[in-house]
Image (cartoon, rainbow, N blue to C red):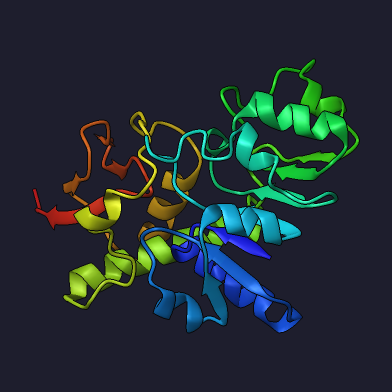
Amino acid sequence: MGLVGFGRIGQCLARLIDPLGGELSVADPYCSAEVVAAMQGKLVGLDELLQSCSVVVLAAALTPETRGLLDQRRLALMPQGAYLINVARGGLIDTEALVAELRSGRITAALDVTDPLEPLPANHELRGLPNVLLTPHIAAGGLETRRAIGEVSVGEVERFFKGEPLKNVVTRKMLATMTWRVCGSYDGPGFGRTAIDLLAIKGITLHRVRVALVEPFRISNGAIAEKDAILIETKNG
């Protein structure tokens, strides 16, 4: 198996597949060979990974450098019968090149994300190909997962107020290699409401919260608008 991207998601996936055996190859320019080796993997170049792995999972961030990472040339490197799984961002793959490869029947794809349209139009060719599995960007969107996301968020807020070390800090250095998303303010159900409801259950009130990351992140009605925001300061009143 090959993992493209070895951040938190990639490493979590590596732990899940470790009991299954097999060889793990990793392509990530920001990860050291020592980190990969500690998880029973081998750090290789992207082209080598695509040529040698029968299953390739994309878990990388979408940045200007990674947009179109799997283009026609790189997709052609994948062996006959290989599986391509994208759980990251649709923009990592050149969609037209992917459709051409899938149309030929050489490879099979499982896509939780697509680009540039998500969801795909009803008449898009990807919907009709027998060697494509599509999920609407909610592959992990079950009730248990959503509850767990809220619990993680509430746990971080509790640790912040207690002055304890946080477990999921995003630094500026990390941000440089992550997907940046523009988001609006929170005004309906979803992740934000789950987290705020859990805070209420635990007796925690956020009077005023400041978050810092990028300008599009905003606060609305006292709720955290985006789950990836960093909590940096609170004030009462």
Q: Which residue of the protein is positioned furthest toward the right in this rendering?
A: 130
- Identity of the residue drawn at 19% across and 69% down: 161
Q: Is residue 86 left or right of residue 220?
A: right
Report x, y in % for residue 127.
81, 27
Out of 192 and 73, give the one closest to the viewer.
73
Q: Can residue 183 be seen in this view?
A: yes
Report x, y in % for residue 93.
59, 36
Out of 38 and 174, give the one closest to the viewer.
38
Asked if residue 137 is positioned above or below residue 10 in the image, the reply reads above
Out of 187 and 61, give the one closest to the viewer.
61
Report x, y in % for residue 88.
55, 47
- Identity of the residue drawn at 46% across and 59% down: 150
Q: Is residue 76 left or right of residue 108?
A: left
- Identity of the residue drawn at 16% across and 56% down: 232
- Identity of the residue drawn at 43% across and 59% down: 198
Q: Can residue 119 be seen in this view?
A: no
Report x, y in % for residue 50.
64, 53
Q: In this view, does 233 lie to the left or right of 172?
A: left
Q: In which quarter of the image is residue 122?
A: top right
Q: Is residue 129 left or right of residue 122?
A: right
For the image shown, how many numbered marks are present on the structure?
A: 0
Q: In which quarter of the image is residue 1?
A: bottom right
